[in-house]
């Protein structure tokens, strides 16, 4: 998104909030990747160990979309504008205070997920 298109009314400093993606809901539809004005998200592949943590419905969904999901690889750039929350058709994204997200273990190992994606044919 070009700089002139960035939301003018977003007063939140970067890094105070961060997006948290519900792994049972994300179906990798990319809306957040397209909508985020700060380029926070990238597509990746959910790691096998994390697939085992999903609910039954989460596993069914994961199989259906080849385990492709969105990952907040640049979560520190989040300005809490809320556009990803509104854009996600699966209602999979919420915003949490960054300190809470880290303390509760809601931060995903993005680097490993993206390396896994890079190895896919
Ligand atoms: S709240 Fe805004 S800045 Fe933060 S990840 Fe979502 S779209 Fe990007």
Image (tube, rainbow, N blue to C red):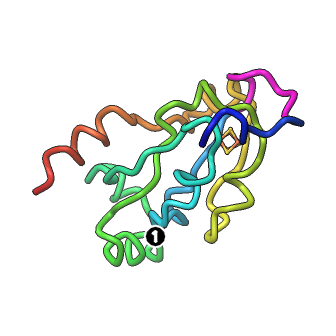
Q: Is residue 115 left or right of residue 31?
A: left
Vertical placement of 116 versus 68: above or below? above
The x and y percentages for residue 58 are 46, 70
Front-most of 93 and 40? Answer: 40
Q: Secondary structure at mark 1?
A: helix
Image position, residue 71 (x, y; %): 46, 45
Residue 116 lies left or right of residue 10; in this view the side is left
| Residue that appears at 61% across and 70% down | 90
Locate the C terminus by quadrant: bottom left
Quadrant placement of the N terminus: top right
Give 43 or 64, whichever is nearer the viewer: 43
Would you say the beta carbon of the disc 1 residue lies within 8 angstroms of ligand 1? no
- Position of 82 with respect to 57 (left or right) is right
Residue furthest out toward the left: 121
Q: How many marks?
A: 1
Using the rendered view, name the quadrant where residue 13 is placed.
top right
Q: 74 or 2: nearer the eye?
A: 2
Q: Quadrant of ligand 1?
A: top right
Q: Which residues are magenta?
A: 10-17
Q: Name the residue at 43% across, 62% down.
A: 54
Residue 63 among those drawn in magenta? no
- 15 inside magenta stretch: yes
Residue ID at (71%, 55%): 85
Mark 1, Cα crowd under 10 Å, few <14 / some 14-19 / many 20+, is many
What residue is disc 1 on?
58
Residue shown at the point (68%, 22%) measured from the top left: 15
Q: Is residue 89 above or below residue 50?
A: below
The prevailing secondary structure element of the residues shown in magenta is loop
x, y percent for residue 110? 39, 36
């Amino acid at each position: 998104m070009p700089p002139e298109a960035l939301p003018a009314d977003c007063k939140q400093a970067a890094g105070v909030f961060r997006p948290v993606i519900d792994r049972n809901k994300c179906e990798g539809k990319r809306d957040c990747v397209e909508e985020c004005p700060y380029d926070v998200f990238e597509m990746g592949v959910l790691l096998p160990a994390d697939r085992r943590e999903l609910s039954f419905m989460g596993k069914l969904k994961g199989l259906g979309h080849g385990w492709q999901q969105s990952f907040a690889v640049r979560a520190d750039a989040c300005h809490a504008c809320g556009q990803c929350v509104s854009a996600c058709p699966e209602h999979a994204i919420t915003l949490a205070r960054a300190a809470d997200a880290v303390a509760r273990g809601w931060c995903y190992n993005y680097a490993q997920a993206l390396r896994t994606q890079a190895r896919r044919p």
